[in-house]
Amino acid sequence: MSEERKYVGIESERVTEAEIEYLGKDADMPVMGTDVNWDEVMKPYPPRKITLPNGDEMIVKSMEKDEVEEVAEALQPKTLQHKQLFDLIAHELCTELYLWRENRPMWCCPPESHFNLVGRVGDEIVGCSNGVLSSPKVGNSLHTVAILEGQQVGAQLWGCKLEHYFDVLGIEALHAGAESYRGSTELFAMFGFKELPDKVTHFGVSPEQYLTKEQWARLRPGKITGERI
């Protein structure tokens, strides 16, 4: 009988991250920005209070790693919304949250450059938005998902994410891809993104787009609402 193989994985009762063996650190992985001191670059998003059309107040703030499971559970209904790739987008966002929790690279960007914003109305999670940086001057938007629909949650989180990228982190340009029809028509078009016709999103459904710091400065007054708290 062959020797029984020992499997090492993520256990619900694990004590420390060190219990999980990570082989990627010794592999030749194309990760950008490994020479950057991300502790000096990354900053938390200053919380913002936004009044939604129904009168509820949404608080947008940076997510902590101990909130990942709660946010992922709140996203589960969106994984079953089988239209406009919402199911795929929500699943992918959950995966990125778990990669961030485990301090793993994603999309060739270091885990230290990953940030997540969460919107709450009271104790209810109503949306989530995340992104990474490939360098201190270039951001790569990932996903924005509105769990509560019909109250402009997605558009508000999108504006907060751009504020975080340009005003807080100080990037010069943001690259992004609209993977759903709603994202393309209600977010990217409204915010003045320009297409990069020679590049497409990894879903292969739309061209990659970009927004510069100068464009954002012109757009910002009409795209940021609410107040810092």
Image (cartoon, rainbow, N blue to C red):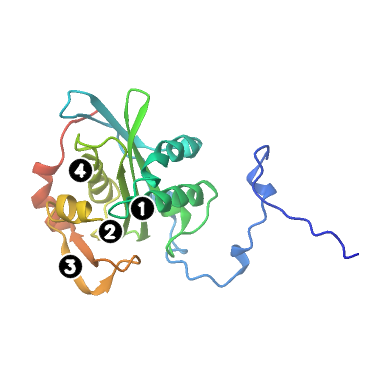
- Determine which residue is flagged by label 3: 195
- Determine which residue is flagged by label 1: 89
- Determine which residue is flagged by label 4: 155
Alpha-carbon neighbours of circle 2 within 10 Å: few (<14), some, or many (≥20)?
A: many
Alpha-carbon neighbours of circle 1 within 10 Å: few (<14), some, or many (≥20)?
A: many
Q: Residue at x 36, y 27 (%)?
A: 124
Residue 43: x %, y % from top left = 36, 44
Q: Residue at x 16, y 40 (%)?
A: 224
Whole-number angstrom distance, CA of label 3 to CA of label 2: 13 Å
Residue 128: x %, y % from top left = 34, 41
Q: Are marks 1 and 4 in contact (CB under 8 Å)?
A: no
Q: Residue at x 69, y 48 (%)?
A: 19
Alpha-carbon neighbours of circle 4 within 10 Å: few (<14), some, or many (≥20)?
A: many
Q: Quadrant of residue 213?
A: bottom left
| Type of the residue with mark 1 | Ile
Of the numbered discs in the image, which one, if any, rests on residue 178? none
Left or right: residue 82 compared with residue 185 = right
Q: Residue furthest right?
A: 1
User: At numbered mark 2, what does the secondary structure look like: helix, strand or loop?
Assistant: loop
| Type of the residue with mark 2 | Glu
Q: Is 120 rendered above or below residue 93?
A: above
User: At numbered mark 4, what does the secondary structure look like: helix, strand or loop?
Assistant: helix
Q: Are marks 2 and 1 in contact (CB under 8 Å)?
A: yes
Q: Are marks 3 and 2 in contact (CB under 8 Å)?
A: no
Whole-number angstrom distance, CA of label 2 to CA of label 1: 8 Å
Question: Can residue 43 be seen from the camera position used here?
Answer: no
2 or 1: tag closer to the N-terminus: 1
| Type of the residue with mark 3 | Glu
Instruction: In this rendered view, identify the residue nearer to me: 127 or 88.
Output: 88
- Determine which residue is flagged by label 2: 179
Labels 3, 1: front one: 1
